[in-house]
Image (tube, rainbow, N blue to C red):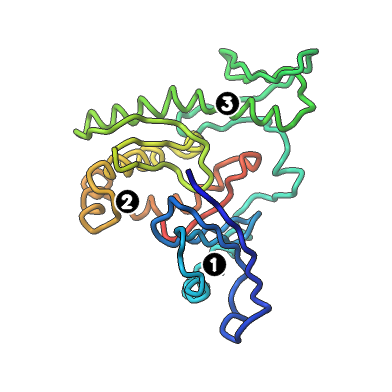
Amino acid sequence: MSLWRKRDCDPSHGSDSVLSLPSYIVRESRRARNVRLVLSPRTGLEVVVPHGFDRDLIPEIVRRRAGWVEQVTARFEAQRRPMTPEAAWALPEGLPLRAIGEDWRVEYRRTASSRVVARPRADRVLVVSGEIDDTAAVRAAVSRWLAREARDVLVPWLEDLAYDRGFVHGPVTVRSQRTRWASCSGKKAISVNLRLLFLPEDLVSYVLMHELCHTVRMDHSPAFWTLVRKFEPDFRAKNRRLKEGWKYVPGWLESERTSAPF
């Protein structure tokens, strides 16, 4: 279980060296092993630190990555979709599941039921029915369907890769993670993000292979990347593309963000 704490950091106060820093929020996590910078066009820069980390060290870390923050911010401005609050929170009209080459249309039907349910049809139409004016309930219903679809698709996909490449892993779960495409625990349990369904097929395959390699090496050492290269020779190019993977994910899922280091 993670304990999170946020603190606003205002660069308008403090020493001259802090004046040039971008504004940021600190989030403390018991799960974090290292400091990580996460940048989102909606929430800005967040610095994720391990529990008990010396916060006096954070300004220097942010200063060193100020160039990265500036570059990614400029890329957000140049490449992101027009994102008004209404567009970001609008109900989905379609679900482009690039991972499996399917483009679903969402159809809404208001009924007397107070519940909201999402049921698929054979013609790739997801019918959402019930109290459809409750946008939060609609998003939750569509997300539940996406989670079921991800379990049906991503779990067998990973298992097939593991069998073909000779990896042994623990249980596989599907989650709705905000900052990671997938993760692997020390006991070889793998968690995959339902948002992977929106990514191109080759990136999804790379993410799954990346996590399988973590069942052998639980770090990002040279030995780990040597193992990754064995199965994904162009892993560097795919890492770069994954840093912009947020652009494939619909705004209503609130995952337009990137992080450093990757």
The local secondary structure at tag 2 comes to: helix
| Label drawn at residue 144 | 3
User: In this image, 200 relative to 114: left or right?
Assistant: left
Residue at left 33%, top 31%? 158
Q: Which of labels 3 and 1 is toward the front?
A: 3
> Residue flagged by tag 2: what amino acid is it?
Phe
Crowdedness of circle 3 by 10 Å Cα count: few (<14), some, many (20+)? Answer: some
**Which residue was labeled with disc 2?**
235
Q: Position of residue 105 (x, y in %)?
A: 63, 25
Q: Which of labels 2 and 1 is toward the front?
A: 1
Q: Nearer the viewer, residue 59 or 166?
A: 59
Crowdedness of circle 1 by 10 Å Cα count: few (<14), some, many (20+)? Answer: many
Q: Real-space Cα distance between discs 3 and 1? A: 34 Å
In contact (CB < 8 Å): disc 3 and disc 1: no
Q: Position of residue 38 (x, y in %)?
A: 52, 58
Q: Position of residue 225 (x, y in %)?
A: 26, 53
Residue at left 58%, top 19%? 124
> Residue flagged by tag 1: what amino acid is it?
Val
| Label drawn at residue 69 | 1
Q: Real-space Cα distance between discs 2 and 3? A: 31 Å
Residue at left 77%, top 28%? 134
User: In this image, 71 relative to 32: left or right?
Assistant: right
From this view, report whether residue 165 is shown above or below residue 251: above
Numbered disc total: 3
User: In this image, 161 relative to 55: left or right?
Assistant: left
User: Residue pushed farthest front?
Assistant: 52
Q: Nearer the viewer, residue 161 or 116?
A: 116
Snapshot quadrant of residue 160? top left
